[in-house]
Image (spheres, coloured by chain):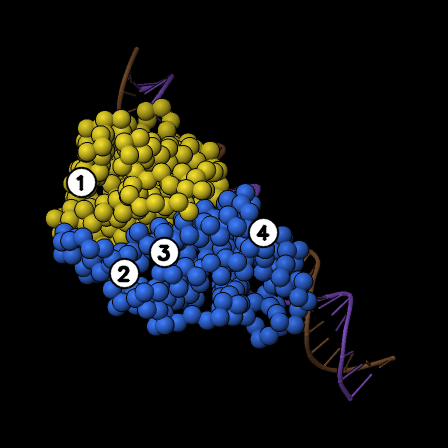
Chain colours: A blue, B yellow, C brown, D purple
Amino acid sequence: MVRNRFDNLDEDKQTRLLDCAADEFAERGYDAASLNKILEKAGMSKSSLYYYFEDKTDLFVSLTERSIAFLMREIGGFDPADLEADNFWSELEGRVRRALEISNRNAWYVKLGRMVLRLRGQPKGQDKTGRLYGAARSFVETVLLRGQELGVVRTDLPQSLMIDCAMSLGEAVDGWMLTHWDEMEPEERLAMVTVNFSLFRRLLEKTDEPQTAADALKNS
Amino acid sequence: MVRNRFDNLDEDKQTRLLDCAADEFAERGYDAASLNKILEKAGMSKSSLYYYFEDKTDLFVSLTERSIAFLMREIGGFDPADLEADNFWSELEGRVRRALEISNRNAWYVKLGRMVLRLRGQPKGQDKTGRLYGAARSFVETVLLRGQELGVVRTDLPQSLMIDCAMSLGEAVDGWMLTHWDEMEPEERLAMVTVNFSLFRRLLEKTDEPQTAADALKNS
DNA sequence: CTATTGTTGGACCAGGTGGTCCACATATCT
DNA sequence: AGATATGTGGACCACCTGGTCCAACAATAG
């Protein structure tokens, strides 16, 4: 983002642009998203866009960073190190629940998730989006590592596979929520958080079963 | 595919084209895949491609249909109705294992999975690819419905969500296998089938727990 | 009122996309 | 040999992409 030019723009125009961009990015993914379509929807001309942002990547990254910052502020921060064995899952679910409460007026938090999660699979190691996805990924990793430390997250899978699966599941759940968003009442959405969370738990929670076959292939 | 022209082409050229196309489609997804790159890699000119296929979609669909046909022939067919409660998971795993054994010389079976699975999320309701993805999806649905009939697959989720999650997990697992393909020995790959399969089982298997909260939202 | 700065519309660009066309080459058949 | 189908190289097309540029407009400072 170029300086703080964008901050000085009318708040209406700001949110209009950002909303349209979020829609497009969430729906089509970073690569396939079209700047021209965003501009058209937002009623802004290209020269303006490039007056406020350096390029497509900058728009995308600024958008996500703003969203995350806003979310974190509303949620009240989050440090995986604070999680303990007996509250690991419930704390996590609580955060997600609060995040969803915030975005109940508008689906943008879910869109945010979709935008970021979709970066996996985009082949280009596009510098900045790559780093953003890497950050999201290592955040997930940190949480899961903490869970393993506490003995509540399974340790029998290759780490990278477990993370891939977690994020992929996240993308699926996120996409489902987004496509069914308008069919649901706010309280239904909240109920779905519980449902969705149980899926993650099933996938990632440590069980008492042997799992010997899997243990042989822990690394890489 | 235009007539049977393509069948009359040198087998070498056939497989070269198909291989390159599979690589490109698996790596970048249908939309992002570039015909020009495929042509370049395969050393074929565009007019030839369009002599054998109607368009990009036709190439893609023909490729997947051929692959599926070949796979089914090698595997010896597969009818979900034959599955029974006591062999549901083991039969399924057996099929996957055999499929992987076939593709151990070359990753194309895994690539095939990736190609199809990746169609989810491609926004265009592109006629033919849409139908192909729809077919894959309803195949998954059929299997899962059979599992529910037998009481071994959970029934507490919205059907569409469960399918989304299953396919998404499939994509993740598939992608992981593909990126780690060369680091593994054939027998390691087979071992990973077991690991991966346990993931699906965890996610989809019916358990004895109550799950009341989830049951309230079964539909849509 | 002028000069400087901030802001925008829109023409324009190179490069890539899927797709078309046609002239030429190569086989096949009579 | 000639005529006829089968196949291919490559120029070309319209379209769309992210991105540049500049002239004109608005606002503010001196």
User: Would you say the residues marked 4 and 2 are in contact, meaning their CB atoms lie under 8 Å apart?
Assistant: no
Q: Are marks 4 and 2 on the same chain?
A: yes
Residue under circle 2?
A153
Residue B88 rendering spot, x and y as whole percentages: 22, 34
Q: Is residue B220 left or right of residue A38?
A: left
> What chain does badge 2 belong to?
A
Q: Quadrant of residue A17?
A: bottom right
Looking at the image, which is closer to me, B153 or A13?
Answer: B153
The structure residue drawn at horizontal position 22% and vertical position 32%, both measured from the top left corner, is B85
Mark 3: amino acid: Met
Q: CA distance from mark 2 to mark 3?
A: 15 Å
Q: CA distance from mark 1 to mark 3?
A: 25 Å
Q: CA distance from mark 3 to mark 4?
A: 28 Å
The structure residue drawn at horizontal position 17% and vertical position 44%, both measured from the top left corner, is B104
Q: CA distance from mark 4 to mark 2?
A: 43 Å
Of circles 3 and 4, which is in front?
3
Residue under circle 1?
B97
Residue B42 rendering spot, x and y as whole percentages: 30, 43
| Mark carried by residue A37 | 4
Looking at the image, which is closer to me, C22 or C24?
Answer: C22
The quadrant of the picture occupied by the N terminus of chain B is top left
Q: Secondary structure at mark 1?
A: helix
Residue B96 rendering spot, x and y as whole percentages: 21, 39
